[in-house]
Amino acid sequence: AYRAYQINSGGLSEQIDLKNGSTLALRAVNGNVGIGTAAPGAKFDVNGRIRTGGGDAGTTDAVIALRSASGSPSFLYWAESGIAERGVLGFANGSGALAYRSGASSFSDGTEVFRIESNGNVGIGTTNANWKLTLITPGNTGQAFAQFRDSDDINQFSFLSNAEGDAELRMYDTAGVQRVEIQSGGNSWFNGGNVGIGNSNPQARLHVSSATANQLIARFTTSDQSRAAIR
């Protein structure tokens, strides 16, 4: 059975019985309305799950709209009760970038982890994403920037910096064994097969080809500028 209650100066009745026998508890405290809670801490406070849908036939959109006042942020906020603030995801005031801040309850605390700019650029560890992907890690030596793995969880590429801060690229075979290392300021090596320059089918460890006759194809120079040339 349905029961209707009159709203008066004392607020809403504590309980409304629904037709199926379940209970929807509505409580008004200082202008706040709570469902499933006797102490609502916001204009609308729900203790439990919320579901929105477009109907079984999917004929209408399911939308949650966050519309802030001019100059104010709009965001989703996560926290584990009695443990920690987990983070916020949304838009800071005046910003068109979607940003996630870890350990935050608003856009004025915590640490920004990543953002997606309005032009599609992505920044990780930075608020200045000038490229399609800009990634910054703490410090300037021994940094692990990115790792790419295949569907078998085997590493294929790694981008990092070494102990001196030089850029480093590592490449691996299908078994996850490193075969190539290229460093901007250290030793680089190739151990995955023959290397070709000017051809796509090298027949030796180093195979250099030139389409021009009598062209200098290699030069070796020492620190005193003495050198040997191979034609």
Image (spheres, helix red, strand yellow):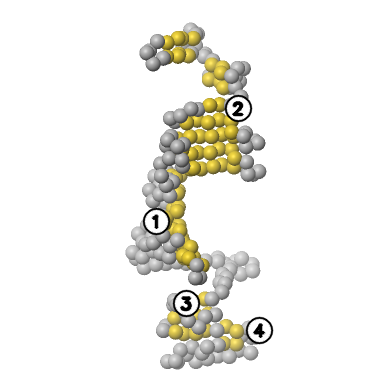
Say which residue appears at 42% left-offset and 92% top-offset.
9
User: Which numbered disc flags the more N-terminal residue, 2 or 4?
Assistant: 4
Q: Are marks 2 and 4 in contact (CB under 8 Å)?
A: no
Q: Are marks 4 and 3 in contact (CB under 8 Å)?
A: no
Query: Is residue 152 or residue 34 the one in the foreground?
Result: 152
Which residue is the site of mark 4? 20
Distance, label 4 to label 3, CA atoms, is 24 Å
Which residue is the site of mark 2? 192
In front: label 2 or label 1:
2
Which residue is the site of mark 1? 96
x and y percent of residue 88 in the render? 45, 62
Query: Is residue 54 or residue 91 the one in the foreground?
Result: 91
Mark 1: amino acid: Gly
User: Which numbered disc flags the more N-terminal residue, 1 or 3?
Assistant: 3
Tell me if residue 32 can be seen: yes
Q: Which mark is residue 44?
A: 3
User: In the rendered image, which quarter is residue 222 located in?
Assistant: top left
